[in-house]
Amino acid sequence: MLSLLKNILNSQNSQEDNNNNKDLELLCGLMIEAAYTDGNIDLNELNKIKLSLINIFSEDPKEVSLVLEKAQQNKNNSKSLHYYTSFINKNFDDKKKILLIEVLWEIVLSDGEVHDFESNLIRRLAGLLYISDVDSGNAKKRALDKNQK
């Protein structure tokens, strides 16, 4: 009986770990997608992605490094936006989704210029995540303010 309880608890913990790892993979993949929309990823964008995942989304730095490296290698095998947004809509609250849009704006702005493709991507993501234009615009303003400091 005791071993049965241990197995149940261990399987619940491993499911939580898998879900946390899936969160990290999706966030990292989406951030790489945003950074690569203009055709290249520079060091500023990669550093911004890494710091955002660690500091804002409270991910483990070692895991972030591994997943970020893997995401970079797979950047040409990108998933559809629906793949990312369906998971995010099911697992993130509105506050976390708005925070994600703000971080995506920070990543896009980190190389000093915003391409039409980048702003179009974030506008589409905001719509797919059911974020209002006002909230998305405010997230962009906050990202611009952070970028100018």
Image: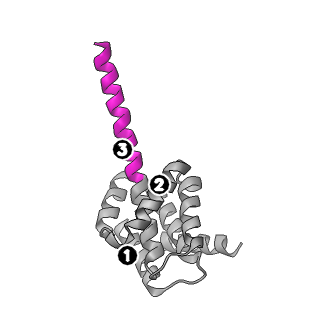
Q: In the rendered image of this protein, does residue 56 appear above or below residue 33?
A: above
What segment carries the magenta color? Answer: 1-23
Tell me, for residue 18, which label it has, or none: 3
Instruction: Identify the mark nearer the N-term, 2 or 3.
Output: 3
Secondary structure beneath dot 2 equals helix
Amino acid found under the numbered disc labelled 1: Arg
Q: Which of labels 2 and 1 is toward the front?
A: 2
Tell me how far mark 3 sits from mark 1, CA to CA. Answer: 28 Å
Q: Is residue 2 above or below residue 12?
A: above
Q: Which amino acid does label 3 sit on?
A: Asn
In the rendered view, does 111 fall on the left or right side of 22?
right
Amino acid tagged 2: Leu
N-term-proximal mark, 3 vs 1: 3
Marks 2 and 3, how far apart at CA: 15 Å
Report how far apart the C-alphas of labels 2 and 1 lie in the structure.
Answer: 28 Å
Q: Which of marks 3 and 1 is in front?
A: 3
Q: Which mark is residue 124?
A: 1
